[in-house]
Image (cartoon, rainbow, N blue to C red):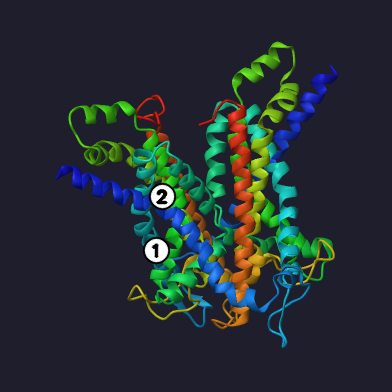
Amino acid sequence: MKNKIIQACGFALLSACMIITALFLAGIIYFIAVNGRQALSWQFLTAPPLNGMSAGGVAPAIVGTFYLTMGSVIFALPLGVGCAVYLQEYSAGGRMSDIIRVAVNNLAGVPSVVFGLFGLGIFVKFLGFGVSILSGSLTLGILILPGIISASQEALLAVPVSFKEASLAIGATKWQTIKRIILPCALPGILTGVILGIGRAAGETAPILFTAAAFYKRGYPNSLFSEVMALPYHIYALMTEGVNPEKQTAIAYGCALILVAMVALMSSLAIFIRNKYRSAYGNGPRRNYNA
Amino acid sequence: MNSLKERLIKYAFTAMGYLSLLLLFGIMAVLFIESRPAVKELNILNFLFGPQWRPARTPAEYGILPLIAGSLSVSFGAISICVPLGAGAALYLNELAGETQRRVLKPVIEILAGIPSIIFGFFGLVAVAPFLQETFNLPVGVCLFTASIVLGIMTIPAITTICEDALSFVPRSFKEASFAMGANRWQTLTKVTIPAAGSGICTAIILGIGRLMGETMSVLMVAGGAAVIPKSIFSPVRPMTAAIAAEMGEAARGSMHYSALFLIGLVLFLITLALNILSEHISKKYRLKLGQGR
């Protein structure tokens, strides 16, 4: 009897944890959605800021975030997939692949502001790209690289070893097998990683603080070397700079809503793709490392 | 001919494979090089344990003890919120949630884990800080307490995900053996499942601390920004990340202040690196223990 009561209390406690967590997070999303909706309009999405940030829209910030995000993916996708292919197909099981795996995990844990310092030191200063789309994209690209590597590796791991053996058996070379069989089969998993990376890159602020972002920039960026406005930085700047806090806060709500919606959409899409393709090859045996 | 091409391709992939290793060392190298003037000029012990951070004064004082204290206090404040709630939610998912609930809750938590920190900082500034200021009658709403709450809530989904992962590694047979001995579900959970997943949960806590120490935008907005060692939970603080983010804009390139900020970055980098290696070590041992070693 006593045990039953303890069990009931314990389970109630766990349920409470789940409910509190859900309420907190749902509350934040709801709060931003309700307040942000008032700011949203067609003009808000398509017009540049006016009257010293107190009116108008945020179109340049949306465009800037788009450029930075695309730039980071263009940089990180080939390198990330390449690294995963090396780890999975060329060096699997070796000592070096263990070391690289540890490096990737540690790279994933580096604080985002430190990536910003790295970008400032190497791209802005040393390579002379200045505070620009290029510097910001490269910095964000390095930030999302570990995620893309892990996702690609998992995707490569899920390709049944029999596919590869069949290809090699009919005389295809290793590269032909990778290009025609393994990568196409792993594509949905790689795509998942890329979409999650886009969501991450779009929301990160600290890495672009010293490498790409400007509070206000007239017109739209016209080269890789121009500074840009970006949505997450715009929220920060609206809350900390300028002379019209009340109107700026209203605009910041709008930006926050756009950003949350964008990131949530990306994650949902990634999860959808992953679930759809997870069982595409059945739950076949895990790839043998020595194969 | 064909084999030459194959070899070249292999070299290309190898180069890309080594890139992440190179980047990790590159980050360290840039931090070392840029912080060298500060290392030369300032005694490293005075830098780490100096009680005053006053880069704008003349003569300037560069002691990061208040910044370290800020980072640590916010991290531990946040951990005391997100670990119980996050681990509790993970146990709920693992033990109590039905198939349907799990199918809905797991992706939702994953999506929430991806919400950028600037959003939480913004929410903290417009909602949490004014609310706490009124409730507790504080002089300022942005302080250690506010930052701990905001960061705590923000980190729950990440902790839940890692703990859930650790719990799913516990073999079914452990539980079945416990049930066979006549233990009920709660006893099995507390005496078998949690101890078996213990080091996995430890990993979650260590990774959580690492992530919180590196968290930038939200603490920049809600921690208050005063570079003093906190006297109470309602003191404003300036964690290391916030100092870098806030001051880099005004520090002239090549100045002592600039270099000192890179040195803070280096300290931060080494702390998070140590925490990551520690958690990796624990989780590897743990998987071997449960027979899931690779």
C-alpha span from label 2 to label 1:
13 Å
Image position of A126 with respect to A108: above or below: below
Image position of B50 with respect to B80: above or below: below
Res A195 label: 2
Res A66 label: 1
Question: What is the chain identity of the residue bearing mark 2?
Answer: A
Viewer-proximal residue among B178 and B53: B53
- Identify the residue shown where x is 41% and y is 28%: A286
Res B193 label: none
- Identify the residue shown where x is 58% and y is 31%: B287
- Identify the residue shown where x is 70% and y is 44%: B83
Question: What is the chain identity of the residue bearing mark 1?
Answer: A
Labels 2 and 1 in the same subunit: yes
Secondary structure of residue under mark 2? helix
Q: Quadrant location of residue B235? A: bottom right
Secondary structure of residue under mark 1? helix
- The N terminus of chain B: image quadrant: top left
Marked residue nearer the N-terminal end (2 or 1):
1
Q: Position of residue B79 (x, y in %)?
A: 72, 50
Q: Quadrant location of residue A87? A: top left
